[in-house]
Image: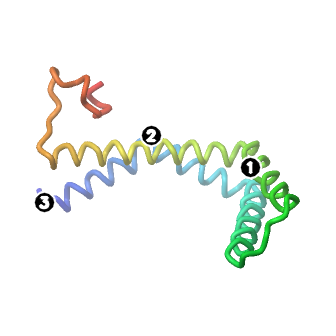
Amino acid sequence: MSYIEKAKELGYALRECKETLVLQAAEMNLDNDQEAQNLIREFQQQERKLKEKQESGIAITSEEWDQFNQVQEKMKQNKSIQAYLAAQANFYKLLQQVNLIINQVLRGETCSPSACSQCNNPECK
């Protein structure tokens, strides 16, 4: 089996894993939450506005920072946004673990029972 076929096999396996399924469900939930969508749009607009002012050398007022911070706080309170961010973090953690394992193999490292305390493979622990 070629490495391309193996990569596809890995992709299909990752598509069916818990982290991916939870992320997809959280994304659908987020897409259907109008309050969350409004908060995201408002956050992006304010962020863009602040960035443009900074790049133009215009001082940002404390009122503008307060408004930006208020939107961030509202986002932290939104369950759909928080669930999505948590699911995304777990998915990225999974991808990092997969990448770590691939890199270990490429470096010729193997996991043995005597080296488990030093092993970063989540399957080993």
| Amino acid at pointer 3 | Ser
Residue 44 position by quadrant: bottom right
Q: Which residue is drawn at the image coordinates 84% and 54% (left, top)?
A: 66
- Please tell me whether residue 109 is drawn above or below residue 57 in the rendered image: above
Left or right, residue 2 beside residue 49: left
Among all residues in the image, which is located at the extreme right?
A: 63
Choose the circle earlier in sequence order: 2 or 3: 3
Label 1 belongs to which residue? 75
**Structural crowding at the residue carrying mark 2, measured as other residues with C-alpha within 10 Å and reported as few (<14), some (14–19) or many (≥20):** few
Q: Position of residue 64 (x, y in %)?
A: 84, 62
Q: Quadrant of the C terminus?
A: top left
Mark 2 → mark 3, Cα distance in angstroms: 26 Å
Q: Position of residue 121 (x, y in %)?
A: 28, 34
**Structural crowding at the residue carrying mark 3, measured as other residues with C-alpha within 10 Å and reported as few (<14), some (14–19) or many (≥20):** few
Left or right, residue 66 beside residue 125: right
Q: Which residue is drawn at the image coordinates 25% and 30% (left, top)?
A: 119
Q: Quadrant of the N terminus?
A: bottom left
Q: Secondary structure at mark 2?
A: helix
Label 3 belongs to which residue? 2
| Amino acid at pointer 1 | Met
Residue 48 position by quadrant: bottom right
Choose the circle earlier in sequence order: 2 or 1: 2
| Amino acid at pointer 2 | Lys
- The number of discs equals 3
**Front residue of this view, candidates 91 and 55:** 55
Label 2 belongs to which residue? 18
